[in-house]
């Protein structure tokens, strides 16, 4: 499995988790010139912009540690653009990270 496939699987898992928690998923892989937002969701009146990081090992740190300051800035810019584009600029919003760690242990016992 390559990184793109793993990312797609992680994003699917994240969307399912959000829906199970009562969030409505508005968009997946939403792009603008400021960057990409993996998932845009809503819960009540609050808009949530979610970065999903999926890993199979901790060789390069935890999934959440992969969200760099640069990525945070781009995500916030993209979130503001999304809110303006869809007339939601007065809605409460936040940026979340969902870390997905997949550890398949073959022949575990």
Image (cartoon, grey):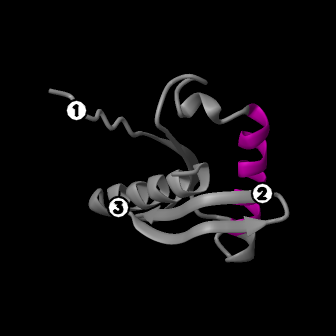
- Viewer-closest of 6 and 93: 6
Quadrant location of the C terminus? top left
Number of on-image labels: 3
Residue at 39%, 39% in the rendered image: 102
Q: CA distance from mark 1 to mark 3?
A: 28 Å
Q: Earlier in the sequence, mark 1 or mark 3?
A: 3
Asked if the magenta segment contains residue 81, the reply would be yes
- Based on the displayed image, in which of its 4 quarters is residue 70 positioned? top right
Q: Position of residue 36 (x, y in %)?
A: 71, 59
Q: Residue furthest bottom?
A: 86
Instruction: Name the residue carrying label 2.
Output: 35
| Residue 101 shown left or right of residue 65 in the figure | left
Residue at 71%, 41% in the rendered image: 72
In this view, 39 is above or below 87: above
- Based on the displayed image, in which of its 4 quarters is residue 84 positioned? bottom right
Q: Residue furthest front?
A: 107
Q: Position of residue 29 (x, y in %)?
A: 62, 66
Residue 69 in view (yes/no):
yes
Instruction: Name the residue carrying label 3.
Output: 16
Residue 48 in view (yes/no):
no
Point out the stretch of residues depicted in magenta.
69-83
Q: CA distance from mark 1 to mark 2?
A: 41 Å
Q: Residues within 10 Å of mark 2 (few under 14, many from 20)?
A: some
- Viewer-closest of 73 and 36: 36
* Callout 3 secondary element: helix
Q: Position of residue 17 (x, y in %)?
A: 33, 55
| Residue 14 shown left or right of residue 53 in the figure | left
* Callout 1 secondary element: loop
Instruction: Name the residue carrying label 1.
Output: 107
């Amino acid at each position: 499995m390559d990184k793109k496939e793993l990312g797609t699987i992680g994003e699917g898992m994240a969307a399912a988790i959000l829906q199970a928690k009562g969030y409505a998923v508005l968009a997946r892989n939403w792009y603008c010139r400021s960057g990409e937002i993996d998932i845009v969701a809503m819960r009540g009146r609050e808009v949530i912009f979610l970065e999903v990081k999926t890993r199979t090992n901790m060789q390069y740190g935890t999934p959440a540690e992969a969200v760099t300051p640069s990525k945070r800035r781009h995500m916030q810019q993209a979130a503001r653009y999304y809110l303006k584009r869809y007339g939601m600029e007065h809605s409460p919003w936040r940026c979340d990270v969902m870390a997905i760690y997949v550890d398949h242990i073959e022949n575990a016992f």
